[in-house]
Amino acid sequence: MSGKLYALSTGPGASDLITVRAARILGSLDILYAPAGRKGGDSLALSIVREYLGEQTEVRCCHFPMSADSVEKEAVWDDVSAALVREVKAGKTVGFITLGDAMLFSTWVFLLQRIGSPEWLEIVPGVTSFAAIAARSKTPLAMEQQSLAVVACTAPEDEIERALAQHDSLVLMKVYGRFPRIKALLAKAGLLDHALLMAEATLPGEQCWRHLGEVADDQPLPYFSTILVNKQWEPGQ
């Protein structure tokens, strides 16, 4: 079997933040699988990498449901992972693209669980959204002996509170739809002056809020919104 599968991280959004390795591989693919959040909808990951694709590459968009229905999601993961393996066994060079880094809060990980670790699989890392936010906002992720925690805001409230108390620096991901709750927890921990919120980092719609106490609870936020907290650094410092 001469096929190959690449899981390709696209980075946070700007097309020039994709790695050189990923760009080179994209130009050599026979088939590219691109995830889309809505049936028939556009794929943000595809828009990031399109300029790097070769003329020979066949693009296949696949819809990954955002619903809480685990049965529906698992059926899609089963179908897509099986399709990837099938194309590799047919001798094709195949790519699957994913936003940010493939191994962090990524749909790809669910496919990896099904595919395993065959020799014909290569995972190409990428710039995470929070690395881009730190750079764009000039806010250190961690300094000297600080501990850094990456926490999903979908976690139980007591777990988020515990993380805020235990760590010096935090990345709070999946803020969308949960901002009032997270803002209240930051206020309770006395951390509002050490936090910033950025949405759609590196994309044309990028927005940054450095004074969260002044941000209304009903402030409309894009889906890609993240909060950085560093207890030894104040936004604007």
Image (tube, rainbow, N blue to C red):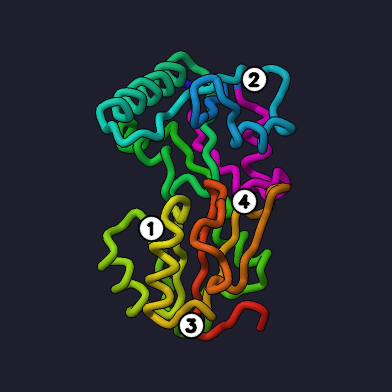
Relative to 198, residue 148 above or below = below
The residue to which callout 3 is attached is 231
Which of discs 1 and 2 lies nearer the camera? The answer is 1
Q: Position of residue 36 (x, y in %)?
A: 52, 29
Instruction: Estimate how packed mark 3 is, as few (under 14), some (14 to 19) or many (20 or more) residues with alpha carbons within 10 Å.
Output: some
Q: Amino acid at mark 4?
A: Glu
| Residues drawn in magenta | 5-29
Q: Which is more toward the observer, 133 or 204?
A: 204
Q: Is residue 14 magenta?
A: yes
Q: Label 4: few (<14), some or many (≥20) within 10 Å?
A: many
Q: Is residue 4 left or right of residue 14?
A: left
Q: Which residue is mark 4?
A: 200
Q: Is residue 118 visible?
A: no
The residue sitting at 62% across, 59% down in the picture is 132
Q: CA separation, marks 1 and 2? A: 37 Å
> Which residue is situated farthest in the top direction here?
90
At mark 3, the secondary structure is: loop
Amino acid of disc 2: Thr
In the rendered image, the vertical position of residue 206 relative to residue 49, given as above or below = below
- SS for callout 1: loop
Name the one closer to the observer, 104 or 28. Answer: 104
Q: Position of residue 205 (x, y in %)?
A: 69, 49
Q: Residues within 10 Å of mark 2 (few under 14, many from 20)?
A: some
Q: N-terminal of the two: label 1 or label 4?
A: 1
Q: CA distance from mark 3 to mark 4?
A: 24 Å
The circle on residue 153 is: 1
